[in-house]
Image: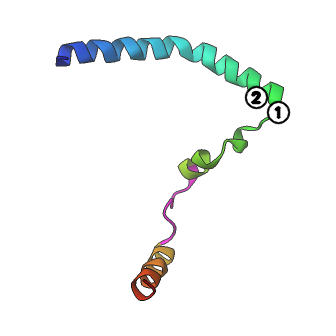
């Protein structure tokens, strides 16, 4: 597949995605209203995206490293 064909395919897929967004948003809002699920109940991925320290603080990582070094 050439670069030109690749770029055309990406453009086509993005256009389809853009066209499907309003329908998908409406479907998900309706589903949320039906089930009563709040946006905050999305799961671990949402929690990971809003934390500014996904790997813990530097002290947590340091102590964890010491444990691995001295307790193999």
Which residue, as the protein is rendered here, is positioned at the far bottom?
70
Q: Quadrant of residue 46?
A: top right
Residue 53 drawn at (x, y percent): 51, 61
Q: Label 2's element? A: helix
Residue at left offset 57%, top offset 50%: 50
Query: Mark 1 Cα within 10 Å, few/some/many (few <14, many 20+)?
Result: few
Q: Do callouts 2 and 1 mark residues in contact (Cβ within 8 Å)?
A: yes
* Residue 48 inside the magenta-drawn segment: no
Q: Quadrant of residue 32?
A: top right
Prevailing secondary structure of the magenta residues: loop
Q: Label 1's element? A: loop
Q: Quadrant of the C terminus?
A: bottom left
Residue 46 numbered mark, or none: none
Residue 3 drawn at (x, y percent): 18, 19
In the rendered view, tell whether residue 51 sits above or below residue 7: below
| Of residues 64 and 24, the one drawn nearer to the viewer in this rendering | 64
Residue 26 drawn at (x, y percent): 68, 17
Residue at left offset 76%, top offset 38%: 38
Q: How many marks?
A: 2
Residue 32 numbered mark, or none: 2
Magenta residues, start to end: 50-57
In the rendered view, tell whether residue 61 sits above or below residue 34: below
Between the residue at mark 2 and the residue at mark 1, the CA separation in whole angstroms equals: 5 Å
In the rendered view, tell whether residue 9 sits above or below residue 71: above
Residue 22 drawn at (x, y percent): 60, 15
Q: Which residue is mark 1?
A: 36
């Amino acid at each position: 597949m050439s670069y030109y064909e690749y770029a055309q395919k990406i453009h086509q897929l993005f256009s389809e995605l853009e066209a499907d967004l309003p329908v998908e948003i409406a479907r998900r809002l309706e589903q949320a209203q039906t089930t009563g699920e709040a946006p905050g109940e999305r799961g671990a991925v949402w929690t990971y995206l809003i934390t500014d320290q996904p790997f813990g603080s530097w002290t947590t990582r340091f102590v964890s490293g010491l444990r691995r070094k001295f307790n193999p």
